[in-house]
Image (cartoon, grey):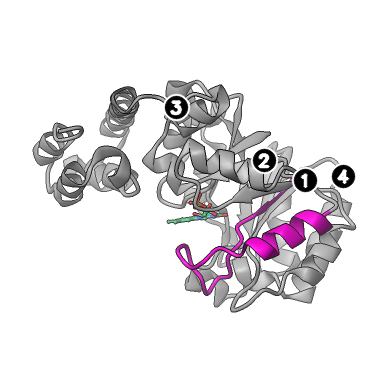
Amino acid sequence: MKYYFAPVQGHTDAAYRHFHARHYGVGSDVVYTTPFIRLEKGALRKKDFKDAMSELNGVANVLPQIIFKNGSELDALVGILKDNGATHIDINMGCPFPLQTSRGRGAATVADPECREAVARTVADNPDITFSLKMRLGMEEEEFMPLLETLNTIRLDHLAVHPRTARDQYTGELHPDAFRMILEHSANPIVYNGDILTPADAAEVARRYPAISGIMIGRGALGRPSIFNEIISGEEWPEERRRREMLAFHRELFAHYGATLVGGDHQVLSKILPFWEYAEAEIGRKAWKAIRKASNISKFQTALALIGK
Ligand SMILES: Cc1cc2nc3c(=O)[nH]c(=O)nc-3n(C[C@H](O)[C@H](O)[C@H](O)COP(=O)(O)O)c2cc1C
């Protein structure tokens, strides 16, 4: 079984990946897909590029992800990453954000014949790159079958499937039958992604779908950053240890941003507060709410002290 830290825009940036891989020591066991890199007015967004190429990427096993709306965007992005030394590239065909789908990117590519042909062509034209792909089931409804047939004609390292449509966003019902159909019909290894919050959830997914090649976790790993250690070792960590390690990990992140961001406390705070967004179950409602409300560093520190209380 392989393990993947799902890309979460605004959360799993280069520093987060670096300190997570280093602190939890899972750098070689977990692949960290970057949040999507995209073109803006025909050029690469500087912020995305800096993140994907950051020297902080040294510790973690990083897989850069691109998002596209047609063949020319796809080829341009692959070309740029290749010129910068990428050997593995992940293609996003699942983002449900209206800002992307309304422009024909992300989940909007699933049912687009031009996009699926572009993927097949680009993968065939770049045999020196190992490609993987991350997809949803479609926009309003399940519409993945023609895409799956096209993907079966090419070789992917893995196909990560989040079994929801764009309409479902992140909380609608999962579609287990569609996932099973993809698993049965895919010629490429399938990675399961969606709603894994605990090691028990991961074990249940592995039991239910023994043919999967991997498990990808996003929000569950942000909320419980020790989850990969716990799954890989087969042993749940006691609450006290999980919280202690989580605080130590977040202290490292805090120190890093304090030393590198130039905008002062406010900027540091706006960077680090979102890291706690999915941690309510792990740290308790009281601390979680206080962190959300913290308007300065001192209130943030006071809020952290409530963890476990
Ligand atoms: C705020 C946010 C940002 C996300 N950004 C990306 C992204 O850049 N690329 C991508 O493929 N998926 C992105 N996702 C989707 C996650 O990678 C993942 O597929 C989804 O959250 C379901 O997995 P989970 O239940 O384990 O979180 C994002 C999700 C959220 C909530």
Q: Secondary structure at mark 4?
A: loop
Report how many numbered discs are placed on residues in the image: 4
Q: Nearer the viewer, mark 2 or mark 3?
A: 3
Judge depth for marks 4 and 1 and give the one in front.
Answer: 1
Q: Earlier in the sequence, mark 4 or mark 2?
A: 4
Q: Is residue 211 left or right of residue 234?
A: right
Secondary structure found at label 2: strand
Mark 2 → mark 3, Cα distance in angstroms: 19 Å
Q: Quadrant of the C terminus?
A: top left
Q: Is residue 79 magenta?
A: no
When the figure is inspected, residue 179 is found, relative to residue 249, above or below; the finding is below
Of marks 4 and 1, which one's residue comes earlier in the chain?
A: 4
- Residue 214 has which mark? 2
Q: Which residue is mark 1?
A: 189
Is there any visible trace of residue 279 in the rendered image? yes
Determine the secondary structure under disc 1.
Answer: loop
In this view, the mark in front (3 or 1): 3
User: Which amino acid type is marked by label 1?
Assistant: Pro
Nearer-N-terminus badge (3/1): 1
- In the rendered image, residue 227, in percent from the top left (x then y), is placed at 46, 33
What range of the chain is rendered magenta? 158-186
Mark before the other along the chain sequence, 2 or 3: 2
State the SS at label 3. Answer: loop
Structural distance between the alpha carbons of marks 3 and 1: 27 Å
Residue bearing the label numbered 4? 127
Cβ of mark 1 under 8 Å from ligand 1: the answer is no
Disc 2 packing (10 Å; few <14; some 14–19; many ≥20): some
- Check disc 4 and give the amino acid type: Pro
Q: Nearer the viewer, mark 4 or mark 3?
A: 3
Residue wearing tag 3: 236
Q: Quadrant of the N terminus?
A: top right
Q: CA distance from mark 2 to mark 1?
A: 8 Å
